[in-house]
Amino acid sequence: MPIHYLYLLIAIIAEVIGTSALQASAQFTRFWPSVIVVSGYTASFIFMAYTLKYMPVSIVYAIWSGLGIVFIALIGYFWFKQSLDAPAIIGLSLIIAGVLVIHLFSSTATH
């Protein structure tokens, strides 16, 4: 795996952890979940910045945000017991399809 994909994967995981902790922080009224939010987003942006040395910002952001949305929706469903209806599942499927199209067919995925 090229290093920039590892950086991007770390950025996505950090963002998902930060966003998941955002729910648990209760609007920043709980200290440790709030610390995890700030740490998660800080790590995410640092590793996303490393990724930008190798890939254009539009592609990095599309993959980062798209996969982050999908992973957060799954965490919301399984961890926080938030339901997903058919349109939400279709929309998430389209996001995944978009990320795959970028990754598999776009020549702008790397510099």
Image (spheres, helix red, strand yellow):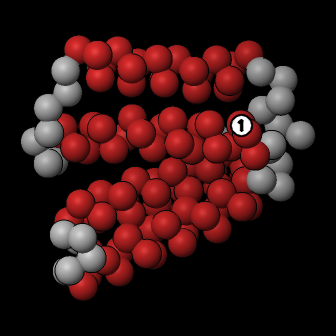
User: Is residue 21 at least partly visible in the picture?
Assistant: yes
User: Is residue 2 at least partly visible in the picture?
Assistant: no
**Quarter occupied by the N terminus:** top right
As drawn, which residue projects farthest toward the left?
Answer: 81
Q: Is residue 87 left or right of residue 26?
A: right
As drawn, which residue projects farthest toward the front?
Answer: 27
Q: Is residue 53 left or right of residue 16?
A: right
- 55 in relation to 95, above or below: below
Q: In this view, does 54 lie to the left or right of 51?
A: right
- 86 in relation to 58, above or below: above
As drawn, which residue projects farthest toward the bottom?
Answer: 31
Amino acid beneath label 1: Ile
Secondary structure category for the residue under label 1: helix
Q: Which residue is drawn at 30% across and 64% down?
A: 22
**Quarter occupied by the C terminus:** top right
Residue 84, quarter of picture: top left
Residue 85 pos. (x, y %): 19, 21
- 62 in relation to 93, above or below: below
Residue 28, quarter of picture: bottom left
Residue 109 pos. (x, y %): 78, 32
Instruction: Please rate how many residues cluster around mark 1, counting C-alpha atoms within 10 Å: few if below 14, some from 14 to 19, many from 20.
Output: some
Q: Mark 1 points at which residue?
A: 59
Q: Residue at x 65, y 57 (%)?
A: 48
Q: In this view, does 73 lie to the left or right of 6?
A: left
Query: In the image shown, does 111 or 90 lie closer to the viewer?
Result: 90
Q: Which residue is drawn at 57% across and 21% down?
A: 98
Residue 21 pos. (x, y %): 29, 65
Total labels drawn: 1
Residue 57 pos. (x, y %): 75, 46
